[in-house]
Amino acid sequence: MSRIIRLAVLLLALVLTMSSMAEARIRRVAKQWNVIETYVGYSTPIGSYSRIGTIDFINNAGIIVDVDADRVYDPSFHLGITYGQLRRGHLLYSIGFRYTKIETLDTFVVDPTISYIFSPIKPSFHQYDIDFNLNFLAANIATAPISPYIGIGFHGGITSQTASGYESENWVTLAASLNFGADFKLWGAPKNRSFVTLSSINSVDLLGSDQRPRYLNFGVGLKYYFRP
């Protein structure tokens, strides 16, 4: 875990360093663009887990153990919307909302003699997040047709378990991710007042609270860039 935390810190330092270098080189470009983004994507669970909802995975020796993601969660989808600012053509800050439908199995095999099952009703799980992202674009998308990017994301929200006839269970959860993808320019307004890009919006969750799944996310979205 400490190694992953150090990696996240190093990635943040790298993004900030690249931004400083880019700002020192850029001349005669718009200093700032506002950005509205909408997206949808596919989420594949990764990692291992010692619990789901209110169930702890305890083996026949009475010890809480980790179970691989594919024995706890199914692939799912997510969607979201963000608002941000592109500074100096390279550094994109954004804040937004993301919803993830958490899909689970109904039986969780801990060892050959112990399994847990949702009974009598399988609950539904949902993830509601406020996201903050800091991404570095390799090229100035205001003037270039394509720009790959890399960055980091921080996510905080509610993991919710609901079932008909039962009280809902909610947990405050956090996560951190590595972001990557590219913007492809689709359209530009006259006098370069605004433009639209098709975006590959991907991420991998490096850290996360115990109650929430971690995902490898692949998505697609539209970004609308406009001057303040």
Image: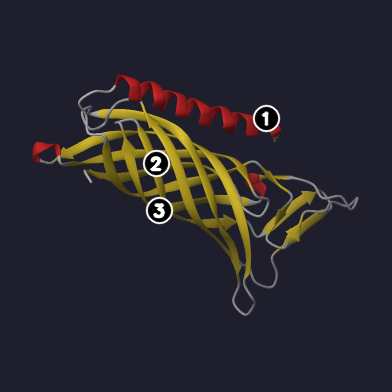
Numbered disc in front, either 2 or 1:
2
Mark 1 or mark 3: whose residue is earlier in sequence: 1
Say what secondary structure mark 2 lies in. Answer: strand
The residue that appears at 68% across and 61% down in the rendered structure is 53
- Residue beneath disc 1: 3
Query: Which residue position holds label 2?
Result: 93
Relative placement, left or right, of 47 versus 79 is: right
Disc 3: which residue? 80
Q: Where's residue 2, x and y in %? A: 70, 33
227 vs 119, nearest the viewer: 227
Q: Sequence-wise, which precedes: disc 2 or disc 1?
A: 1
Displayed quadrant of residue 141: top left
Q: Where is residue 57 in the image (x, y as percent from the top left)?
A: 77, 54
Q: Which of marks 3 and 2 is nearer the N terminus?
A: 3
Residue drawn at x 49%, y 25% is: 14
Q: How many labels does the image show?
A: 3
Q: Badge 2: few (under 14), some or many (20 or more) residues near its Cα, within 10 Å?
A: many
Q: Position of residue 38 (x, y in %)?
A: 33, 50
Residue sitting at x 74%, y 60%: 55
Quadrant containing the N terminus in the rendered view: top right
Say the numbered circle drawn on residue 128. Answer: none
